[in-house]
Image (spheres, coloured by chain):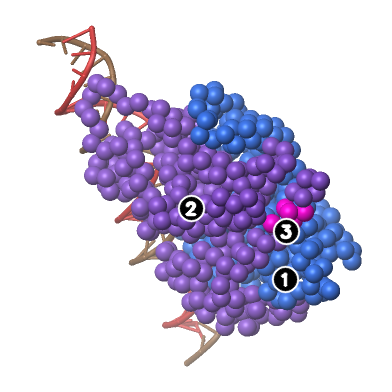
Chain colours: A blue, B purple, C brown, D red
Amino acid sequence: MTEEIGGRGDPVKVLELLWGRAESGKRGPKARVGLADLVAAAVAIADAEGLSAVSTRRVAEAVGISPMSFYTHVPGKAELLDLMMDAVAVGEPDDPSPPSDTDWRIRMTFVAETLWRHYLRHPWVLDLATHRPVLGPNTVAAYEFALSAVDGLGLTEIEMDMTVTVLANFVHGAVRDAARGRMVDEVTGMSDEEWWRRIEPFLETLDYTPYPVASRVGPVAGETYGVGDPQRAFRFGLDRLLDGLALFIEGKRR
Amino acid sequence: MTEEIGGRGDPVKVLELLWGRAESGKRGPKARVGLADLVAAAVAIADAEGLSAVSTRRVAEAVGISPMSFYTHVPGKAELLDLMMDAVAVGEPDDPSPPSDTDWRIRMTFVAETLWRHYLRHPWVLDLATHRPVLGPNTVAAYEFALSAVDGLGLTEIEMDMTVTVLANFVHGAVRDAARGRMVDEVTGMSDEEWWRRIEPFLETLDYTPYPVASRVGPVAGETYGVGDPQRAFRFGLDRLLDGLALFIEGKRR
DNA sequence: CAGAACCATGTACGGTGTAAAGGGTTTGTT
DNA sequence: AACAAACCCTTTACACCGTACATGGTTCTG
């Protein structure tokens, strides 16, 4: 149970680590493990057991060094978290290849779906992606990938960035809801269905007259989110967002 | 440095606390402090020093009880966090009053701006709002408030919920970027401007040929976000999103 | 007035991140 | 060849965290 804050620590130090500029010394004994091993181990732990299972001692043990040897390779935990985020901010081997389509809408849809898959594969990123961006090579590559989808449409640089940011933020929020229904909470060991089932008797005892609209919408939405397809909300929001962007882009083109 | 996870603990227990159903006993001595005192103290600490400063010991001390007496009032920290979220999910006295406008667009804009202010006032909510919803009275009231803006437009219940969710997710993401520039990071004590200034020399040493689009857009966007007005991205995204929703709503109306 | 019920507390345990100091091993310099 | 610098790794220790457990007061009920 540790609040994990990305984007901390000495910002230059972490950049040097991200871009491989921290040349390891020539003098002493060779390191038995590399930085990449530590990061990979930490990612594996986070993927399997959630972010709260990632501790410096645990990561050190996973790669076979003593707890404090961790600090030989990484300045601290904050930097490790940044490195983890950048490490997974890259496509997986089984990802579909991007469409070389001329329709920006198809390209942006693909960007959104790629982000969607990314977050579902590494849900712990959702807990970390609340602070400063990690300007590592993979993160920048992902940024480039997203920007390419809106390049050449007549948008200014700022408009391009804002467009991509809005899309990324939307996916972030949508996948948060989806991850809820899909995963079993590794801490409570309670599935989303059980959660709804547990609280439902209590909810029925409440007086909903102060909430007329919510009491009409809530149960329907709750049922849908509880057992339904969260991908539906994703598609709905994505379509609305792209509709709005289309108006803007076509307005600029003329 | 503690990961704070909202929406945990016994879900019914926390609901009882949220809705005031946990009747305090009649027998023993009267409690010197109430649940609301603990929650208020915790919120004050989080507002002032960030979420990582909120510990059970610290909260207990703030209200003048011993560390373990905390658990007389709250089952555990997870429940406290839920209570904190719901406690702030209500308007402040100096909030502008909602427009009684017939234009849903004006109403939704107001909803978005209210959310925006909410997150800026309590940025720590961003760190907590990643898990299950807290179905407390204030949270439900906020949900009702948002839903009212899209009521009577001919949308189905599910569509209403998805619309509100998309809007909330967008604001969440946009304010995350804004909070970055506005606040001084309470942990590093480094402002956003200083952060950019520190990393800029390093960024100039990188080879950007693999990132042609990002290298064109990034510096412009970085400068804008670094010293510019993040509210601009908020307005841009909000306008695009509302444009897209307008298409859908007007399509359904006919 | 007895006892149940309740609030509050002290102690203790296992966990966290990491500061500080020291031992071993390799390499560059003389 | 000898030495010192540089580096990896380790041990010990500290302050903090959430909270289980046992105990001691206080107040209301029967």
Query: Which mark is first along the chain, 2 or 3?
Result: 2
Residue D17 x %, y %: 38, 47
Quadrant of the frame with the N terminus of chain B: bottom left
Disc 1 to disc 3, C-alpha distance: 18 Å
Q: Nearer the viewer, residue A214 or A176?
A: A214
Report the mark closest to the observer, 2 or 1.
2
* Residue, disc 1: A160
Please tell me in which quadrant of the rendered image residue A142 appears.
bottom right
Label 3 sits on a secondary structure element that is helix
Question: From the viewer's perspective, is residue D25 above or below residue B37?
Answer: above
Q: Subunit of mark 2?
A: B
* Residue, disc 3: B243
**Residue at image coords 68%, 74%:** A158
Amino acid marked by disc 3: Asp
Residue C9 x %, y %: 21, 37
Q: Subunit of mark 1?
A: A
Q: Is residue B65 rendered magenta in the image?
A: no
Magenta segment boundaries in residue numbering = B242-247
Q: Are marks 2 and 1 in contact (CB under 8 Å)?
A: no
Tell me, for residue B97, which label it has, or none.
2
Tell me, for residue A35, which label it has, or none.
none
Q: Is the residue marked by circle 3 packed among few (<14), some (14-19), or many (20+) residues within 10 Å?
A: many
Label 2 sits on a secondary structure element that is loop
Residue A172 x %, y %: 65, 53
A184 sits to left or right of A153: left
